[in-house]
């Protein structure tokens, strides 16, 4: 991912066709390691292609990928109200996750608000 990000940054910076050195320079400027094999693989796959068309094609592929949470299927059982307890438990877990996230987002782990 970081190689792709560096490639896109180089394109945004004005390089129509970034070289391996351009990508390496971007990654080293932020202290990231540069895997030359991955750089060469990326450059071979995007050679002669327009970045706008590549992004559009990627969006089309991602549109077909299922995402998001699926609905919880509760089957009707002969016992009656058996489905209510699992739904309530799932809802309480969801609320706990939301509360934990709210607490952790305050200082982003830097301890500024302690």
Image: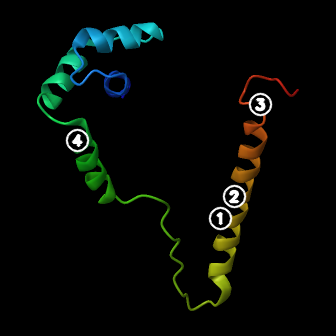
The residue indicated by pointer 1 is 90
- The secondary structure type at the circle numbered 2 is helix
In the displayed structure, does residue 11 sit left or right of residue 87? Answer: left
What residue do we see at 26% from left, 8% from top?
21
* Residue 33 showing in the rendered view: no
Residue in front for this viewpoint, 58 or 48: 48
Q: Which residue is mark 3?
A: 107
- Name above or below for residue 48 compared with residue 35: below
Q: Which residue is mark 4?
A: 54
Q: How far apart are the two marked residues, 2 and 4, measured between alpha carbons?
A: 40 Å
Marks 2/1: CA–CA distance: 5 Å
Earlier in the chain: of badge 2 and badge 4, it is 4
Q: Which residue is mark 2?
A: 93
Q: Quadrant of the N terminus?
A: top left
- Considering the numbered disc 4 on the image, is that residue within a helix, a strand or a loop? helix
Q: Position of residue 77 (x, y in %)?
A: 55, 87
């Amino acid at each position: 991912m970081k190689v792709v990000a560096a490639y896109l940054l180089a394109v945004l910076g004005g390089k129509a066709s970034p070289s391996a050195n351009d990508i390496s320079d971007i990654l080293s400027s932020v202290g990231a390691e540069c895997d030359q094999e991955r750089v060469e693989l990326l450059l071979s796959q995007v050679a002669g292609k327009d970045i706008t068309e590549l992004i559009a094609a990627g969006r089309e592929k991602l549109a077909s990928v299922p995402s998001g949470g699926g609905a919880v299927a509760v089957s009707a059982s002969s016992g009656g109200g058996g489905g209510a307890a699992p739904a309530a438990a799932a809802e309480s877990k969801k609320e706990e996750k939301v509360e934990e996230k709210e607490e952790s987002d305050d200082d982003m782990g830097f301890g500024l608000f302690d």
